[in-house]
Amino acid sequence: MKICPECGAIYDGHRWVTEPSKELLRKLAKSKKEKALCPGCVRIEKQQVEGVVTLKGAFMDSHLDEVENLVNRVAKNGWHQNVSARIFEIKLEGGRLVIETTDEHLAERIGKEVEKAFKGDLKIKWQKKDRFVRVSWHRE
Ligand SMILES: [Zn+2]
């Protein structure tokens, strides 16, 4: 079995797991462990960004924490479903939150979940034959 030294994901011989069952942990304890970067951490190392989400507007000034918490929650759920889907970087630039993701569908999902939770205007623009997405959300 393999363990990712960066994020702790476990490769069980078939797939990468981020929420190991007790059984898998038991197996892991008995087996020979090999360190290997998981596909998500490889993408982060290669700085492979496939989606950019920009969240802005006056609403952000008073609700930054709530929005950021939601983004992190969506990212964590996405990671459990797909080990390659990760936030590469999240930064605050002059009142706007800019999130770069290693997976285009994660960026899309973050935008949709923010719109669902906080209303506002969402725009999703697919580029490079749908291999890259720009998501922008705005609320005053
Ligand atoms: Zn990893």
Image (cartoon, rainbow, N blue to C red):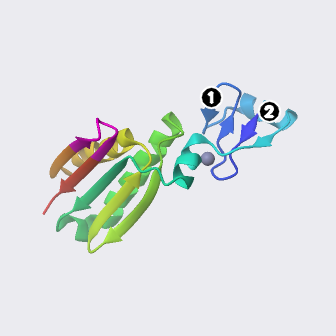
**For mark 1, does the 10 Å Cα neighbourhood hold few (<14), some (14 to 19), or many (20 or more) residues?**
few
Q: Name the residue under label 1.
A: 15
29 sits left or right of 44 in the view: right
Q: Mark 2 points at which residue?
A: 26
Judge by depth and name the residue closer to the eye, 42 or 15: 42
Residue numbers of the magenta segment? 125-133
Q: Is residue 36 above or below residue 89?
A: above
Percent of width and height locating residue 135: 25, 49
Residue pictured at 21% horizontal, 44% vertical:
125
Q: In which quarter of the image is the N terminus?
A: top right
Residue pictured at 29% horizontal, 36% vertical:
130
Residue pictured at 34% horizontal, 38% vertical:
131
Judge by depth and name the residue closer to the eye, 100 or 76: 100
Q: In what element is the residue under mark 2?
A: helix
Q: In this view, does 56 lie above or below 30?
A: below
Residue 16 magenta-highlighted: no
Percent of width and height locating residue 118: 22, 52
Percent of width and height locating residue 108: 30, 42
